[in-house]
């Protein structure tokens, strides 16, 4: 089985880069899993996901329902309302469903770890104060959640 952690975001849009930061930090922490950082979205994510059996996406989210730094876990089954299909903008569940129908090897399992952020609209390198002061705790939280997911998928994580 092939496994991928895909850190997503844009490090030029303040807190939106938290997925990239976490993926970069994980590179020295994990064995037996590929880790990629990407600013891609929509169908462009498939370029990274083809050939993997399990993919974990790490990204930012703005719900306004939780405190900044809160980590949410989702799977494709949590996204039952599909956006109408468009090559330019569609949700990951629709993309995977369409790709399977086309005969592509797409992941059997996709997990989403999303970090509640404060600002993804301001052009600024570096995080908001709210994320900057919490980024180490956020990383540890994500790492702990990954350990659970990885254990359930028979992966090995370096102690540390």
Image (cartoon, rainbow, N blue to C red):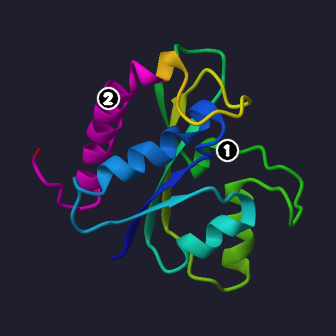
134 drawn magenta: yes
| x 24%, y 69%: residue | 32
Is 10 on the left-hand or right-hand side of 135? Answer: right
Residue at the bottom extreme, as displayed:
103
| x 71%, y 45%: residue | 80
Task: State the SS at label 1.
Answer: loop
Q: Quadrant of the N terminus?
A: bottom left
Q: Position of residue 124 (x, y in %)?
A: 64, 33
Query: In this view of the protein, can residue 113 be seen by the observer?
Result: no
Please identify the dominant SS of the magenta region.
helix
Query: In this view of the protein, can residue 95 be seen by the observer?
Result: yes
How many marks can you see?
A: 2
**Residue matched to label 1:** 79
Q: Position of residue 71 (x, y in %)?
A: 46, 29
Quadrant in the picture for residue 117: top right
Quadrant in the picture for residue 93: bottom right
Mark 2 or mark 1: whose residue is earlier in sequence: 1
Foreground of the two, 121 or 56: 121
Please say if 19 is above or below 85: above
Question: What segment is highlighted magenta in the picture?
Answer: 132-159
| x 40%, y 51%: residue | 23
The residues tagged by marks 2 and 1 sit, at their Cα atoms, a distance apart of 29 Å
Q: Position of residue 52 (x, y in %)?
A: 46, 74
**Residue matched to label 2:** 136
Foreground of the two, 141 or 119: 119
Residue at the left extreme, as displayed:
159
Foreground of the two, 131 or 46: 131
137 drawn magenta: yes
């Amino acid at each position: 089985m092939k496994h991928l952690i895909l850190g997503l975001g844009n490090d030029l849009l303040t807190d939106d880069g938290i997925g990239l930061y976490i993926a970069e930090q994980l590179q020295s922490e994990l064995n037996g899993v590929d880790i990629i950082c990407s600013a891609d979205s929509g169908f462009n994510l498939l370029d990274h996901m083809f050939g993997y059996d399990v993919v974990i996406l790490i990204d930012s989210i703005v719900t306004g329902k939780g405190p900044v730094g809160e980590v949410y876990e989702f799977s494709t089954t949590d996204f039952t309302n599909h956006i109408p299909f468009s090559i330019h903008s569609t949700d990951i569940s629709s993309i995977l469903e369409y790709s399977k129908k086309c005969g592509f090897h797409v992941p059997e399992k996709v997990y989403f770890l999303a970090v509640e952020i404060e600002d993804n609209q301001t052009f600024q390198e570096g995080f908001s104060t709210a994320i900057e002061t919490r980024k180490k705790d956020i990383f540890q939280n994500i790492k702990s959640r990954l350990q659970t997911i990885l254990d359930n998928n028979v992966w090995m994580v370096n102690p540390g």
